[in-house]
């Protein structure tokens, strides 16, 4: 299967030094059956137009760099294949809802701040130091968080979430899923520190369960579940705090 | 530290209303709106005044229906408010007051009517 | 160093971008029908409290062909609401783990349990109505 066909790739272009607004530019790209959209973009950069800017690294769907919109669908361009679109043309755009830095690259600053805000690391309790010993977990304890730990920060879920697009303050799917990943870990004791992120208007309450975050996730992380489980957690915390002793609310 | 959202109150009411609307809504609409008026399985005098008066005079039925209606209102108020936001109408405090205010008003009215029906049964 | 100039795209008519967004708005839209149906039931209750004349007027509306047609739409909206509600319900219920089911239940099982509950509740109400409302 080395038969070469041609597909038209339409890219959104934007160079901040020269362009007032983004525009589309079409390229005719020869491709073979095993070529991904990312390889199509690389062909453009190497042979047709060296000014096209896009991010990529691993080419095997684990680094999370090459996310983009292909025909309005947020995908990893390395595991999306040109053959599945031919003979139609494809339209490649930067991930939706994010500011465009240059061509297909987006500005992730906002997400990185949110990721930091959820304390995405194990916070052990002070009296729980295993010393040199390994900290064992049962298979069930691992299953509690393993799915959420698969996140590669590719941001497809943010590009699929209209609530993030409508309100940039929303903490968003990946950050909240990672918050839940650490809360669900038996080795972690940092729930209290993450509670105000959950409880905020911009926390789990920014979600209206459109559900698309879980649909587009290439690693099947299921942020929609993480967020909606924590709506229950937040609701319990909201009402039960009145039963807690003073000073601990 | 971000302020705590009061959404749990409204979300709980939304959830309760949504659950009841899902569990009993379709059959209620089917019986009251279609089967009884079309006379399918029901006689022509079904849901007559005397019969309904006696039925809703029972506190369990009267207040039960009032609570069902109230939760329908809170369910809808919550979703409508958020959908307006989705459609580009920002949820200002005033809009929130209108949405949840109507739900509170409608619920109060439903409970009041149920009270009249039960007390004067 | 100044942050680079970026371009932010708008959310104009975002629901046209994916069919699932339209499905979502349709799901949320059922709430308008639910609110209106609540108002209609409340009017019936109020008419009942006012007296036989008012209630017969409300009942006459209910028995009109236009009402049948509208109630078909209302039934469709409620059924769509119920179907989608039970579909996403497993995402929201906390996983209840028992000794026999240490991993809790799958979404499909929870969804099936909810649909069964829906069916049983509906059947009980239907039988009660068939017996009581003659």
Image (cartoon, grey):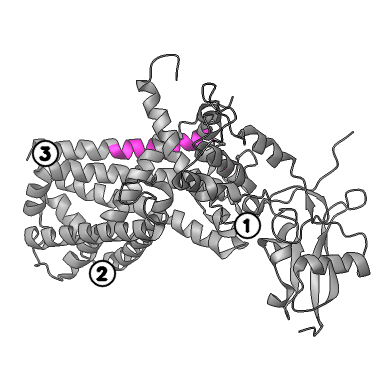
Q: Residues within 10 Å of mark 2 (few under 14, many from 20)?
A: few
Chain letter for mark 2, please: C
Q: Pointers 3 and 1 in contact (CB under 8 A)?
A: no
Q: What is the spatial separation of the Cα atoms under label 3 and label 1, in whole angstroms?
A: 49 Å
When the figure is inspected, residue B114 is found, relative to residue A78, above or below; the finding is: above
Whether residue C61 is visible to the viewer of this picture, yes or no, is: no
Specify whether disc 3 shares its chain with disc 1: no
Please give the name of the residue rendered at 35% of the width and 56% of the height, measured from the top-left corner.
Answer: C110
Asked if residue C22 lies in the magenta stretch, the reply is no
For label 3, the residue is: B118
Q: Which numbered tag is attached to residue C13?
A: 1
Q: Which numbered tag is attached to residue A248?
A: none
Which span is picked out in magenta?
A: B90-107
Q: What is the spatial separation of the Cα atoms under label 1 and label 2, in whole angstroms?
A: 37 Å
Q: Classify the position of the C terminus of chain C by image quarter.
A: bottom left
Q: Earlier in the sequence, mark 1 or mark 2?
A: 1
């Amino acid at each position: 299967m080395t038969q070469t066909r041609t597909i038209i790739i339409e890219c959104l272009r934007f160079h901040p030094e020269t362009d007032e607004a983004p525009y589309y530019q079409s390229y005719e790209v020869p491709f073979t059956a095993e070529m991904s959209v990312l390889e199509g973009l690389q062909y453009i950069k190497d042979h047709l137009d060296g000014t096209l800017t896009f991010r990529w690294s691993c080419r095997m769907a684990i680094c999370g760099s090459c996310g983009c919109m292909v025909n309005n669908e947020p995908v990893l361009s390395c595991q999306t294949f040109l053959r599945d679109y031919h003979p139609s043309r494809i339209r490649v755009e930067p991930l939706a809802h994010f500011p465009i830095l240059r061509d297909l690259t987006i500005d992730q600053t906002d997400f990185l701040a949110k990721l930091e805000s959820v304390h995405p690391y194990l916070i052990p309790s002070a009296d729980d130091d295993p010393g040199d010993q390994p900290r064992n977990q049962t298979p069930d304890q691992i299953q509690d968080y393993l799915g959420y730990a698969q996140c590669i920060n590719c941001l497809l879920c943010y590009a699929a979430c209209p609530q993030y697009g409508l309100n940039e303050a929303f903490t968003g799917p990946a950050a909240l899923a990672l918050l839940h990943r650490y809360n669900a870990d038996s080795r972690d004791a940092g729930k209290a520190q993450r509670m105000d992120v959950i409880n905020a208007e911009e926390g789990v309450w920014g979600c209206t369960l459109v559900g698309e975050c879980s649909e587009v996730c290439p690693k099947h992380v299921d942020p929609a579940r993480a967020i909606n489980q924590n709506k229950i957690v937040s609701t319990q915390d909201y009402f039960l705090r009145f039963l807690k002793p003073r000073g601990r609310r | 530290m971000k302020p705590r959202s009061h959404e749990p109150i409204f979300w709980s009411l939304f959830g309760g209303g949504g659950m009841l609307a899902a569990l009993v809504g379709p059959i209620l609409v089917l019986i009251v709106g279609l089967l009884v008026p079309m006379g399918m399985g029901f006689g022509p005098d079904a849901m007559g005044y005397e019969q309904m008066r006696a039925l809703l005079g029972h506190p369990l039925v009267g207040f039960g229906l009032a609570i069902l209606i109230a939760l329908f209102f809170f369910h809808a108020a919550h979703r409508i408010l958020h959908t307006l936001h989705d459609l580009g109408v920002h949820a200002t405090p005033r809009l929130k007051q209108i949405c949840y205010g109507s739900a509170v008003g409608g619920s109060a009215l439903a409970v009041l009517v149920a009270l009249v029906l039960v007390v004067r049964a | 160093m100044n942050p680079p100039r970026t371009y932010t795209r708008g959310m104009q008519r975002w629901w046209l971008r994916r069919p699932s967004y339209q499905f979502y708005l349709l799901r949320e839209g059922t709430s308008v029908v639910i609110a209106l149906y609540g108002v209609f039931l409340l009017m019936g209750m109020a008419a009942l409290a006012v007296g036989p004349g008012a209630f017969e007027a409300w009942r006459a509306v209910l028995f009109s062909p236009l009402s049948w047609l509208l109630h078909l739409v209302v039934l469709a909206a409620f059924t769509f609401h119920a179907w989608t509600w039970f579909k996403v319900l497993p995402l929201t219920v906390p996983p209840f783990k028992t000794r026999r089911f240490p991993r809790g239940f799958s979404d499909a099982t929870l969804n099936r349990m909810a649909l069964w509950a829906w069916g049983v509740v509906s059947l009980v109400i239907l039988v009660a109505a068939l017996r009581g409302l003659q």
